[in-house]
Amino acid sequence: MDKSPTQIQLNTAKQLLECGVSLGKLRSDYIVRGHRDMVSTTCPGDTLYNIIRSSCPHIVSRTEWNARATKSVTYLKNQPVQYAFIHHSASPAECLTKDSCAAAVRGFQNYHMDTRGWHDIGYNFLIGGEGTVFEGRGWDRVGSHTKNYNSVGLGFCFIGNFMTKGPTQVQLNSAKQLLECGVQLGKLEWDYTVRGHRDMKSTQCPGDILYNIITGWPHYH
């Protein structure tokens, strides 16, 4: 009951789950449950149960979405960081499949690098309308998402325009799971602060509806 699986077992299980997503057998926003969540049982054991409860969402790697090579990398000097900055992409208005969301992410990277002259896509992570999480600059690199605050926080972009309508529930669920994953990995402070982009500068981002949603989250203050 108190013995942990080997790291090889855990890595293989995670790889198998990701394979299921890639093959279209598991949804990209699949939910992990222990046997004890469904019936009265001690299965899968206390230690393994605690491990799976802290599982992070599946994150589509840069390689998977066919990212361009970054021009330069600057790493965060201090981790965990205090802030989680929430953005919306504004355009496209929505993306509801993994392929269309991946195409949007490639478009963002091209715009950020070719038009704005940045070293890479600006966001650390992006969340599609069907719940898929895409790696931008990732947990450890300074982004280009919130001017004057990039070195003290991570930028999370909801793909879509949320001025007049809200994100999908799976999109919100994936974002919340990703934030908690950041805490578990030591990338976000346990008492991290959520802020909308408009809290830091004059902008409509992350849209009126999404902003109203995040102001109700416990870490918004």
Image (spheres, rainbow, N blue to C red):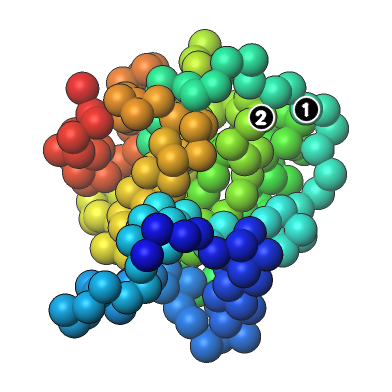
Dot 1 lies on which element? loop
- Return the residue found at the far top: 148
Q: Earlier in the sequence, mark 2 or mark 1?
A: 1
Residue 122 image offset from top left, x and y in percent: 61, 34
Q: Are marks 2 and 1 in contact (CB under 8 Å)?
A: yes
Residue type beneath disc 1: Val
Residue 60: tell me if it is visible.
Answer: no
Crowding at mark 1 (Cα within 10 Å: few <14, some 14-19, many 20+): few
Placement of the N terminus among the 4 image quadrants: bottom left
Q: Residue at x 82, y 28 (%)?
A: 72
Residue type beneath disc 2: Arg
Is residue 4 or residue 190 the one in the foreground?
Answer: 4
Q: Residue at x 71, y 53 (%)?
A: 62
Relative placement, left or right, of 68 versus 36 is right
Residue 137 image offset from top left, x and y in percent: 65, 38
Q: Which mark is residue 141?
A: 2
Q: Quadrant of residue 151?
A: top right
Q: Does 74 sit above or below residue 184?
A: above
Disc 1: which residue: 73
Q: Residue at x 37, y 44 (%)?
A: 180
Relative placement, left or right, of 99 versus 84 is right
